[in-house]
């Protein structure tokens, strides 16, 4: 089966289960537990202070009702003043504490996610596309940080207020609390439905957004290719489809939110009605004063805001939870372990009658047979669109042939464990990625545990030391987009250094198309030779000097092998390679 171009659901990075997400959150929270405890205590004190206000107002009503003396008003007024002051001061203090702890937790989480994102196995990133990763480390981090800044403090305040206010109602008369609780089933009903219905909707919405970003990144990032291959309309259609999907899912979540609010208002109506009714009855039979009934009503009305906030926040918390799960999902991808005990696979690569076509296109590889013997360097040449990149991806196990087999040491690549495959075969693609980050982080993509010495040694092999040693902060220099600029040749050297760090037995290299200046090109050729020494290599050669240095050349045209042999022999002949060779010589 050929991999579809842009699947709407699969092939994105994993999403953590709620349990995994909770574990990651707890891991980030644990070092801050003291701060969390303090913030909770201050918030609880704030809410408790507020509880004194309604009964004090009730007292004033009672005094007024029996036409008492003004002196009787002093005590309740003092209570109201002090409670208001405490509420104000402690309230802002508690808020500050919660936000501060939240920021620390977020920083820890963000750091972990980013460093893991940089260590993700390249194949995993290739498979799921950089758009998904970008959407997670930008949109999802934003979602979670917004929640930590706004939603979490409010959520805590609201939860404390609801619980303590119910206690206050009960302290007036247990029947008031009971009347207030009449509204609860509405709230619980709405909230339960929402917590069950909404999360998958949010996850789906985010996934659709990830797919849309991916489609945009692919279209814009590959704009040259899109134009060159006249893929414009196809890409537009893809972006359109992805946007439409994202839009539809967004509307579904909005509908759910509206449904949720209507239940909340029903709860407010019922609750206030019953507290007033109970108040009237209790005042009527003399078991409560008018002031107490007033206090009860005030208590219940005080619940509107926190319950409303809980509603809003449930909404935001749901969406933040979806984001948190996507962030934690990144942490669930196993970082490439360099297992020492793997059974060695003979570094012999063979393609047998391999056929392949992209999802919605015609067949582009028409039955290719090709063997790269252990230690041999085979160069793949051919005009643009011949299928070289496609064949390289097939050989690396990135695409699965529609017919035929790809074997590594006699074992079908399709059956090999992905980790084992990655351990033995590495693919360097035509577009060289330099991820935004420090040079060291970029290199450790290839081997997370590598020491600085190992990184420098790899750079040495790749011939990059001369310029790396001149970087302002050495390995810690931020390179690539937004950082220290690197030239095309330097970027390719970094890619070669990553390959040296990976140290695979079989290297598949798709030479960058961009024509480096001839001095740069010679430099790169030497780097490539050093990095590939002792490895089995399949090289897609765009510079025929690379092909000339290989043990054997395979010429591919229109998805078929048309010629094969030692470069000198072919160059001396009259076949397609000799033609390519002469054109290349003339063009230089
Ligand atoms: N992602 C894709 N989806 C659909 N068709 C594709 C895709 N990538 C390549 N093709 C098609 O497959 C054929 C082989 O393309 P491929 O990229 O393998 O050629 P190439 O030999 O590497 O070319 P170049 O020298 O320009 O890198 C071309 O017809 C191309 O249009
Ligand atoms: Mg190519």
Image (spheres, rainbow, N blue to C red):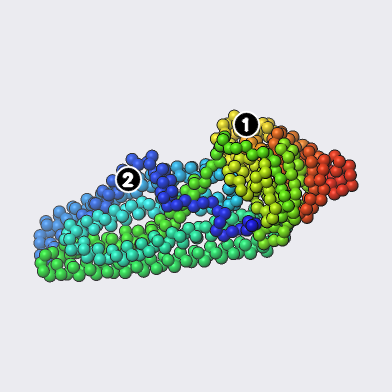
Asked if one can make out residue 172 in the rendered structure from this viewpoint, the answer is yes
Image position of 176 (left or right of 25)? left
- The number of callouts visible is 2
At mark 2, the secondary structure is: helix
Residue linked to disc 2 = 39
- The residue sitting at 27% across, 52% down in the picture is 47
Tell me if mark 1 has few (under 14), some (14-19) or many (20+) residues whose alpha carbon lies within 10 angstroms of its own. many
Residues 393 and 89: in front is: 393
Residues 496 and 439: in front is: 496
Which x, y percent locates residue 417?
A: 58, 45
At mark 1, the secondary structure is: helix
Image position of 291 (left or right of 254)? left
Residue linked to disc 1 = 456
Which x, y percent locates residue 532?
A: 70, 36
Residues 410 and 123: in front is: 410
Q: Are marks 2 and 1 in contact (CB under 8 Å)?
A: no
Which x, y percent locates residue 308?
A: 34, 61
Asked if one can make out residue 468 in the rendered structure from this viewpoint, the answer is no
Residues 462 and 578: in front is: 578
Which x, y percent locates residue 582?
A: 87, 45
The yes-or-no answer for disc 2 within 8 Å of ligand 1 is no
Q: Quadrant of the C terminus?
A: top right
Q: CA distance from mark 2 to mark 1?
A: 47 Å
- The residue sitting at 21% across, 54% down in the picture is 52
- The residue sitting at 12% across, 57% down in the picture is 72
Mark positioned earlier in the residue sequence (2 or 1): 2
């Amino acid at each position: 089966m050929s991999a579809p171009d842009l699947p709407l659901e699969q092939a994105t990075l994993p999403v953590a289960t709620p349990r995994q997400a909770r574990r990651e959150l707890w891991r980030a929270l644990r070092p801050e537990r003291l701060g969390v405890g303090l913030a909770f205590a201050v918030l609880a004190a704030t809410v408790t202070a507020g509880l004194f206000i309604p009964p004090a107002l009730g007292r004033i009503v009672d005094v007024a009702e029996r036409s008492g003396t003004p002196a009787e008003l002093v005590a309740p007024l003092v209570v109201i003043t002090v409670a208001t002051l405490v509420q104000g001061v402690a309230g802002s203090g508690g808020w500050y504490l919660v936000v501060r702890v939240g920021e620390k937790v977020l920083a820890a989480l963000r750091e972990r996610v980013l460093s893991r994102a940089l260590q993700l196995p390249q194949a995993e990133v290739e498979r799921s596309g950089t758009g998904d990763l970008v959407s997670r480390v930008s949109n999802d981090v934003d979602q979670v940080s917004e929640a930590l800044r706004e939603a979490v403090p409010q959520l805590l305040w609201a939860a404390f207020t609801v619980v303590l206010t119910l206690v206050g109602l009960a302290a007036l008369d247990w029947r008031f609390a009971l009347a207030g609780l009449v509204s609860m089933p509405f709230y619980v009903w709405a909230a339960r439905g929402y917590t069950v219905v909404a999360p998958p909707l949010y996850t789906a919405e985010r996934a659709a957004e990830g797919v849309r970003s991916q489609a945009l990144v692919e279209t814009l990032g590959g704009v040259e290719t899109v134009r060159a291959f006249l893929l414009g309309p196809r890409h537009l259609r893809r972006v359109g489809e992805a946007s439409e999907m994202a839009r539809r899912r967004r509307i579904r979540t909005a509908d759910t939110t509206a449904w949720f609010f209507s239940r909340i208002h029903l709860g407010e109506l019922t609750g206030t009605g019953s507290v007033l009714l109970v108040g009237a009855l209790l005042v009527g039979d003399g078991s409560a004063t008018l002031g107490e009934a007033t206090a009860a009503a005030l208590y219940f009305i005080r619940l509107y805001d926190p319950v409303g906030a809980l509603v809003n926040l449930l909404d935001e918390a749901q969406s933040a939870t979806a984001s948190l799960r996507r962030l934690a999902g990144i942490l669930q991808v196993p970082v490439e372990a360099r297992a020492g005990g793997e059974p060695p696979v003979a570094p012999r690569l063979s393609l047998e009658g391999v056929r392949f076509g992209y999802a919605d296109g015609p067949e582009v590889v028409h039955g290719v047979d090709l063997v790269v013997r252990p230690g041999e360097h085979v160069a793949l040449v051919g005009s643009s669109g011949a299928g070289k990149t496609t064949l390289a991806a097939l050989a690396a196990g990135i695409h699965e042939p529609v017919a035929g087999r790809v074997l590594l040491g006699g074992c079908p690549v399709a059956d090999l464990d992905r980790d084992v495959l990655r351990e033995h075969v590495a693919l360097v693609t035509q577009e060289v990625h330099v991820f935004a980050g420090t040079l060291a982080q970029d290199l450790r993509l290839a081997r997370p545990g590598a020491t600085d010495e190992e990184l420098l040694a790899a750079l040495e092999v790749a011939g990059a030391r001369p310029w790396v040693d001149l970087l302002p902060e050495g390995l810690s220099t931020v390179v690539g987009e937004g950082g220290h600029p690197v030239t095309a040749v330097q970027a390719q050297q970094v890619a070669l250094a990553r390959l040296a760090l990976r140290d695979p037995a079989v290297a598949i290299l798709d030479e960058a198309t961009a024509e480096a200046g001839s001095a740069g090109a010679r430099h790169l050729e030497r780097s490539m030779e050093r990095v590939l020494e002792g490895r089995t290599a399949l090289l897609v050669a765009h510079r025929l000097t690379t092909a000339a240095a290989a043990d054997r050349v395979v010429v591919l045209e229109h998805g078929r092998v048309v010629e094969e042999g030692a470069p000198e022999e072919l160059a001396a002949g009259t076949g397609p390679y000799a033609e390519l060779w002469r054109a290349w010589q003339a063009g230089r």
